[in-house]
Amino acid sequence: MKWLRNTIEVWAYEMKCALLDEGVVVFFIIVPLLYPLLYAYLYSHESVREVPTVVVDNSHSTTSREFVRRVDASPDVEIISHCEDMEEAKRMIHSRDAYCLIYIPKDFEKDIAQMRQTTVELYSDMSGLLYYKAVLSSCTEVSLDMNKEIKAKLIPGATEQQIATFQYPIEYKYVSMFNTQSGFASFLIPAVLMMIIQQTMVLGVGMMAGEEREKVRKHIVEPHIIRKNPSEILLGKSTVIFTIYVMVAVYLVCIVPPLFGLIHIWRWQTLLAFMVPFIAACVFFSISLSSIAHDRESFIIMFVFLSIPLLFASGISWPASNIPIFWKGFSWLFPSTFGINGYVRITEMGASLADVQYELNALWIQTIVYLGISYLVYKRTYGKQLWA
Amino acid sequence: MNGLRQVLAIAKREQKRMMARGIYTFCIILAPIVAFLFFTTLMGEGLPADLPAGVVDEDNTATTREVIRNLDSFQQTNIIEHYPDVAAARKAMQQGKIYAFYYIPKGTTQLAISGKQPTVSFYTAASYLIPASLEYRDMKMMSEYASGAVGRATLYAKGYTESQAMAVLQPIKMEMHAVNNPSLNYSIYLCNTILPGIIMLLIMQVAIYSIYVEMKEETAKEWLGMADNDIVKALIGKLLPQMVIWALMALFCLFLLYGVWRFPLNSGIWPMILNMFLLINSSLALGVFFCGLVPSLRWALSLATLWGVLSFPISGFSFPHMAFPDTLKGLAWLFPLRHYFLIYVDQALNGLPLYYSWLNIAIMLAFWGLPIMLLGRLKKFLLEYHYTH
């Protein structure tokens, strides 16, 4: 049982080191604690409401006023001004008082009365895609309603059902599943949570390894690693990180989502069986990477910026089906890619463990491969020098 | 003249230091180039095409097969599989195989022919927001089209002309103009701010590292000594070589965006070069500011990291600023990337005269002055403090 005693000794020492090192505490605890709150709060409105919009109504008719009134009443668009002409409307958009423009042609009402199709033109500033969505969907909804009423007048004496059938010989229904409101927070926050686990761990572990390497250069040897096997050191250290991150993960997946009303429909058995390999893969990935940490700080500069490409490489935003194969291969190196997809499908889409089998397998493979690399790294670092 | 000589001597020293350490080459040249190529090639299509979708066709008639063929031919949708029922399609969604599916219940064709208004439906996995909304668009268009086809056929049979039929079926029509990005290209929408954002983040971090590594290696006295302990000269000398390389990287970034990928550049290139120049110097200034705030390499780096990473969401290029909670709206002013984004929108995207951007330009310039109030502190830190583990 010597190895167990040795491992526990390493564990206890490393745990103390990690918790007493303010730099490491920042990455292991403070960032995972605060960053998700800030992020989730930023997106807490989920989607954009009341997009300021201007109208150029050249028709000046009862019907056009009715159209504008109804668009204004919809939750996503707010009519802030009626402009005389396009020039005035453009000026308002250019000075960012409005983001969208509704243009109603002169013959709007006349066309409808004379049974000619009439076209309302919508313009959207493309600095944000959500403005475009808001004005298009709101105006389309209003036009569908008004079309129905216009048709009712065209077929005098028709029942409601007959008009509906005439309008839509085939009715259709749309169901947005899982993220039912197509909310921005529900879409991005789960991915951010998984990214935080991986990235803060990489930074913290890199910092610890850098510190150790700096000490080695100054010929300071940590007492606890003398006369220990590389495998004992590896087991002791990795368990420290694992222990800390189990607690971090519990906070991130059990407390943060309900706090911001995000969807969380998971069964705990499924989530547990998924998070364990994810955290394990992250632990050994971090240790493997930390072999290139030359000093305490260089790691921060080298890896923080990577969070943004990695978020996109996971396929949560730009779809995975359309990621070029080269970048896909690149993304397979990182636990976050599989962690994000599995986590989103389990917690938001109610996937079972069998449904995320692919991600699960990938994470276990990563765990084993990175464990192997970690062992080699430790063997090289601690193998010879410390048996003296 | 003596001052200039000192600054140049420090710059030369800095250049040697930078060339001697791999971390500078990695962070100033390699990392940004890889990130630039990553984002522009990742989203090279502009709008993702042929997204995997499924079908549940319980009716399975010539008409429904035609509808499905049509849907498949839409640009964003690729029908990869037919499922026996909704449960199977839902499962495929949970397994991440498809982003959406179209459901045609049994008897749809028969009901449509006899005028009994059947209902078809479509489902999207909105957790994957972008592919879900694109397939939604295709499926909705397909549904409108299918319904319209039946309606038109009825009207043609009654002797209506095509334009009359359209006027009856859809008296009011919407025509959407996505100004300056008509194809809704995601790459235009995201890369224009993400790439400068990455530059900004790395500029701050590298600047902080290069300043406080002198404390760590106890060479700060030597460095300041070369400027007769004048912190301004010492900083200018140190940051000058970085600024030059960053300027070249920024030009490369602009070349990639507007030269290679031909993204909208309605202002001409000069306002964007100005924008990048403002961003580079604001980021350097923020880096120095963080150094003056906390006398520690890792704390200053941590602050820069927090600021830099937060810049991406808070600049409002993906989730718009107007939808933030009120308390965070004001905070956005403190991030150079937010101003870069707004200048970009006015200039490259919308091609407005430069004076529309005056406020954002002024604030970017104000960032340059930010470190001034902390210079004395920073000098004291560098001369009197020691690196602690």
Image: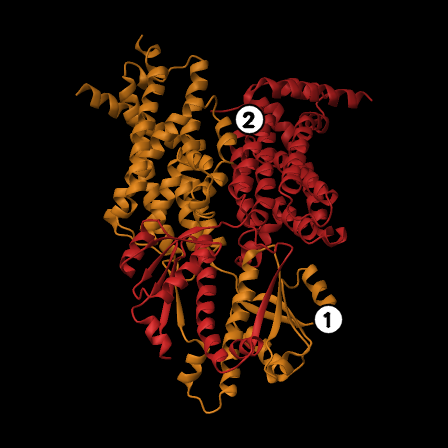
Chain colours: A orange, B red
Q: Is residue B83 above or below residue A236?
A: below
Q: Position of residue B34 (x, y in %)?
A: 54, 32
Circle 2 residue: B26
Q: Amino acid at mark 1?
A: Asp
Q: Position of residue A175 (x, y in %)?
A: 38, 64
Quadrant of the frame with the N terminus of chain A: top left
Q: Chain of mark 2?
A: B
Q: Is residue A306 above or below residue B356?
A: above
Name the side, left or right, on which B55 lies relative to A272.
Answer: right
Distance CA(mark 1)–CA(mark 2): 54 Å
Residue nearest the viewer, comparing B97 with A347: B97
Per the rendering, the mark at residue A85 is 1
Q: Chain of mark 1?
A: A
Q: Of helix, strand and loop, which one carries label 2?
A: helix
Q: Is residue A95 at all visible to an observer of this figure? A: no
Q: Residues within 10 Å of mark 2 (few under 14, many from 20)?
A: some
Q: Is residue B170 above or below residue B11?
A: below
Q: Position of residue A265 (x, y in %)?
A: 30, 55
Q: Position of residue A61 (x, y in %)?
A: 65, 83
